[in-house]
Amino acid sequence: MFDARPIGVFDSGVGGLTVLHECLVNLPAEDFIYLGDTGFFPYGSRTLEEVRALAFRNASFLVEQGVKLIIVACNSAAAAALPQLQAAFDTPIVGVVMPGARAAVQETRSRRVGLMATVATVRSESYQQALLSLDAGVEVFPVECPRLAPLIQGGDVFSEEVEEAVREYVGPLKASEVDTVILGCTHYPLITPMLRRLLGPQVSLVNSAEEIAREVGETLERKGVGNKEGREGDYRFYSTGDPEAFRSVGARFLQLPIREVLLWEAGAEVAASLGQHV
Ligand code: DGL
């Protein structure tokens, strides 16, 4: 028995391609449909209500495509809306927060865990709650990193500007003597070497993209909805912003070829309801 339907993935833009990368590498037989909401990036500086509205319209779009499972690859969206999405849709939905929190609790020895994430993710307190639900004795040190995702997406990942921002954000984590740091944003795996150097080798980094890929694999197996073993899966893309820009910026995140990107022009109603933020 196998289930040939694709898996849907959505993100605020190209960052979730780090999640898709892990899924493509670890689950090569599966087909994927990826929706990048580049027209509405970034989510991290929006209110939780706005992010929730965007997450609902993204999930509805993927359900219409006939997916068997939805991955909320975006930390800001998972933090703002995962329980509400799960309650509203029949399709199983998984998100990045809990797998990352679980890995951090397993990893830490000092039980002092740092979190680097967008403002929306930190303020939703989802990671903090997830960590405490797994180990009530853990101490969490969250740092809002508003400049990081736009800088990583927009320019040279290895620039001094990025390094300067990283140096500023890791400062409080070093002072708090955490031994584990959750990379609570899709963009941060791209700057892993810089983070390792500035945090020091004694600090473990938790990559939420790797953790969610593991969880998806387990979910498919347990539910018995994996695709036929041995086949080579396909993957395709929709974006709400310029498809060409998605393609050129996205390749750096996916590290695999990006072929056709289709424009999804929906969202005008949501755009109107989000007012000046769009
Ligand atoms: N995908 C988003 C996240 O993980 C990237 C940042 C943003 O949209 O603000 O939070």
Image (spheres, rainbow, N blue to C red):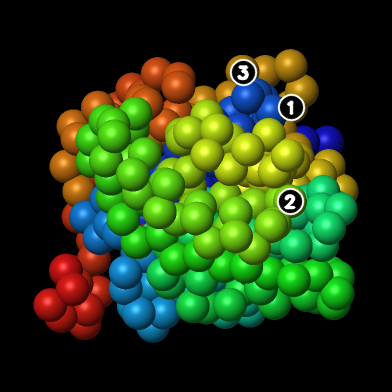
How packed mark 1 is, by other alpha carbons closer than 10 Å (few <14, some 14-19, many 20 or more), is some
Q: Is residue 193 above or below residue 221?
A: above
* Tag 2 residue: 179
Q: Is residue 278 above or below residue 229?
A: below
| Distance from the alpha carbon under mark 3 to that under mark 1 | 9 Å
At 18% across and 73% down in the image, what residue appears?
A: 277
* Tag 3 residue: 232
Q: Nearer the viewer, mark 2 or mark 3?
A: 2
Q: Which mark is residue 228?
A: 1
How packed mark 3 is, by other alpha carbons closer than 10 Å (few <14, some 14-19, many 20 or more), is few
Q: Nearer the viewer, mark 3 or mark 1?
A: 3
Query: What is the three-letter code of the residue carrying label 3?
Result: Glu
- Check disc 2 and report its element: helix, strand or loop: loop
View quadrant of ligand 1: bottom left
At 63% across and 38% down in the image, what residue appears?
A: 200
Percent x, y of residue 188:
48, 43
